[in-house]
């Protein structure tokens, strides 16, 4: 697979791919990006920064400093907000641009990896036609920005080890460290990038002196901002990242969810995916075979280079991305097992693995193309056409589906809610208890109080003050000191929400939503 077109034509093609990517996000989100609880946290944090109040939990009445969510995404939205855009609008503009830019960056990585501009273009086209990656960028979350910094870090790392850039290798390595720190400040799983680059520097450099010095340069570039953020959290909140270390191993349900998510990446047309998923062992076999092949390739090339430094260096981009697959998956599994049992293995969590898989897929195709005869090239072309056809069908359906209305809290169900309209009319100083503090903040601009829970979703441990919390909420509502707003309640609900409402009379009830409030007598 060789590049017969001029570099200018190739760059123009990548530019068109980037424009197409941005267009697809705008097309898929006419009512704005999808919004979730985490989206609200980032948006509220950005608004707090714009108001000069620091990075705070503005969606909660307590308005404490944020430590659970790293600051880069909210900080970027706040910078965009300096131009007069609300962070919700800014997030849509940012993620649309990032969908295009990330496609172009992945294309550049593929171009450098395979030495073929055509392979890079194919890779960018695979990115913008991928249903899973579109959905990641169509939600107001930090993953698109994380992918952006990660892709730039891989590109700079490749430059740092390139013989052509040897005189500026340290500069590129410093840039890699800085970009890795920005990835970490976007998502804490950026630590997987740190491990990936340190291991790669040890395996790929020729001498122990270069291995140690280059690792120290990289770590010295990464560490200051990461340490500063941890110190800030310790000072304002008494913890580094709002994570508690506790062993709660991966469950079979979590792994099954991850398998379903991955199956959607492989087969993006839902009807086809459900049909194939009736035999989930197919996807298990695919995962095992792919990971095993990548692992064997890494071990052979890494050990060969480490044990005999005179051996030609393996292709850096493919090698580091292969390492990253295992580093990232290990970081996610450890995070779930040690820090946050509620982390779902959904598309946004697994998306950072999809890009290395696409890179390695195109690299394998380019390798087969260059070493095969007519029959082999026919097979490569046939597989490419099948992948593109399936991806295009899935992408067209996703754009159509998403464009019908906002997802999550951006749905008309929330912005046309009668319950929200009532809450907006409450006196400004009336506290609101609710099971949806993010949604209430979005549509009323008020920080809320959370409801008591029996079990901490992060640690999986039972709270010891649930009954006391229920009594406090009920007393406040009955005395007219606070309102209780419950959303998506089921008929004959026997959950803990029923304990809160026992004996209370709603002032408004609409669909599954209810407001309980006893206005004080004048």
Image (cartoon, rainbow, N blue to C red):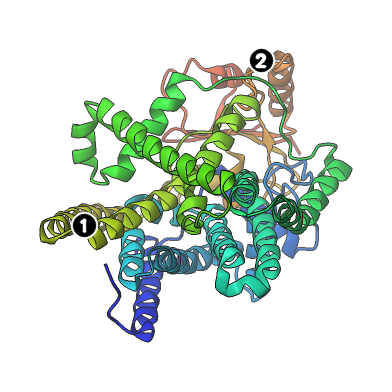
In the picture shown, does residue 511 fall above or below 23?
above
Q: Is residue 242 left or right of residue 504?
A: right
The answer, for residue 411, to whether it is visible in the render is no
Between residue 393 and residue 40, name the one nearer to us: 393
Q: Mark 1: give few (<14), some (14-19) or many (20+) Cα within 10 Å.
A: some
Displayed quadrant of residue 457? top right
Q: Residue at x 70, y 67 (%)?
A: 170
In the picture shown, does residue 415 fall above or below 28?
above
Across and down, in percent, residue 370 comes to 26, 62
Across and down, in percent, residue 6 comes to 33, 85
**Tag 2 or tag 1, which sits nearer the N-term?**
1
Q: Is residue 420 left or right of residue 462?
A: left
Q: Residue at x 16, y 60 (%)?
A: 377
Tag 2's secondary structure?
A: loop
Toward the right, the furthest residue is: 235
Q: Which mark is residue 462?
A: 2
Distance in Å between CA atoms under marks 1 and 2: 51 Å
Across and down, in percent, residue 484 comes to 63, 32
Across and down, in percent, residue 75 comes to 69, 61
**Circle 1 is placed at which residue position?**
384
Quadrant of the drawing holding the C terminus: top right
The answer, for residue 447, to whether it is visible in the render is yes
Q: Which mark is residue 258?
A: none
Quadrant of the drawing holding the N terminus: bottom left
Tag 1's secondary structure?
A: helix
Between residue 68 and residue 161, name the one nearer to us: 161
């Amino acid at each position: 697979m060789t590049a017969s077109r001029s570099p200018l034509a190739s760059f123009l093609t990548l530019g068109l791919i980037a424009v197409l990517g941005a267009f697809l996000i705008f097309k898929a989100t006419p009512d704005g990006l999808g919004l979730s609880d985490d989206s609200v946290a980032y948006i509220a944090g950005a608004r707090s920064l714009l108001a000069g109040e620091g990075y705070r939990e503005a969606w909660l009445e307590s308005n404490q400093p944020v430590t659970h969510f790293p600051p880069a995404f909210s900080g970027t939205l706040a910078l965009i907000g300096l131009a007069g855009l609300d962070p919700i609008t800014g997030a849509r503009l940012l993620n649309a641009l990032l969908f295009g830019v990330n496609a172009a960056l992945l294309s550049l990585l593929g171009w450098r990896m395979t030495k073929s501009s055509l392979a890079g273009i194919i890779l960018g086209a695979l990115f913008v036609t991928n249903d899973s990656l579109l959905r990641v960028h169509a939600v107001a979350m930090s993953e698109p920005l994380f992918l952006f910094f990660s892709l730039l870090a891989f590109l700079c790392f490749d430059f740092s080890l390139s013989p052509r850039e040897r005189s500026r290798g340290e500069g590129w390595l410093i840039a890699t460290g800085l970009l890795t720190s920005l990835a970490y400040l976007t998502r804490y799983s950026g630590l997987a990038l740190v491990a990936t680059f340190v291991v790669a520097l040890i395996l790929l450099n020729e001498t122990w002196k270069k291995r140690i010095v280059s690792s120290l340069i990289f770590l010295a570039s990464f560490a200051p901002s990461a340490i500063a953020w941890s110190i800030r959290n310790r000072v304002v909140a008494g913890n580094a990242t709002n994570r508690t270390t506790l062993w709660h191993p991966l469950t079979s349900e979590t792994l099954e969810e991850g398998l379903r998510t991955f199956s959607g990446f492989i087969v993006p047309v839902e009807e086809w995916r459900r049909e194939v998923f009736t035999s989930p062992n197919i996807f298990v076999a695919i995962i095992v075979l792919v990971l095993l092949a990548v692992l064997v390739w890494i071990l052979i090339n890494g050990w060969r280079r480490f044990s005999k430094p005179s051996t030609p260096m393996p292709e850096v981009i493919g090698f580091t991305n292969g390492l990253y697959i295992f580093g990232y998956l290990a970081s996610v599994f450890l995070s779930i097992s040690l820090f946050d049992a509620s982390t779902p293995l959904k598309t946004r969590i697994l998306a950072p693995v999809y890009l290395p898989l696409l890179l390695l897929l195109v690299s394998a195709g380019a390798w087969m193309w260059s070493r095969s005869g007519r029959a082999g090239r026919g097979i490569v072309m046939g597989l490419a056409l099948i992948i593109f056809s399936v991806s295009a069908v899935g992408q067209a359906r996703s754009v159509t589906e998403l464009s019908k209305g906002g997802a999550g809290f951006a749905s008309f169900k929330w912005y046309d809610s009668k319950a929200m309209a009532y809450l907006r009319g409450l006196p400004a100083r009336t506290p609101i208890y609710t099971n949806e503090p993010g949604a209430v903040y979005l549509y009323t601009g008020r920080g809320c109080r959370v409801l008591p829970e029996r079990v901490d979703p992060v640690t999986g441990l039972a709270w010891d003050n649930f009954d006391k919390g229920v009594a406090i909420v009920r007393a406040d509502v009955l005395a007219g000191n606070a309102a209780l707003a419950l959303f998506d309640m089921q008929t004959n609900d026997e959950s803990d929400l029923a304990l809160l409402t026992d004996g209370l009379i709603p002032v408004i009830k609409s669909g599954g939503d209810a407001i309980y409030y006893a206005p004080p007598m004048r």
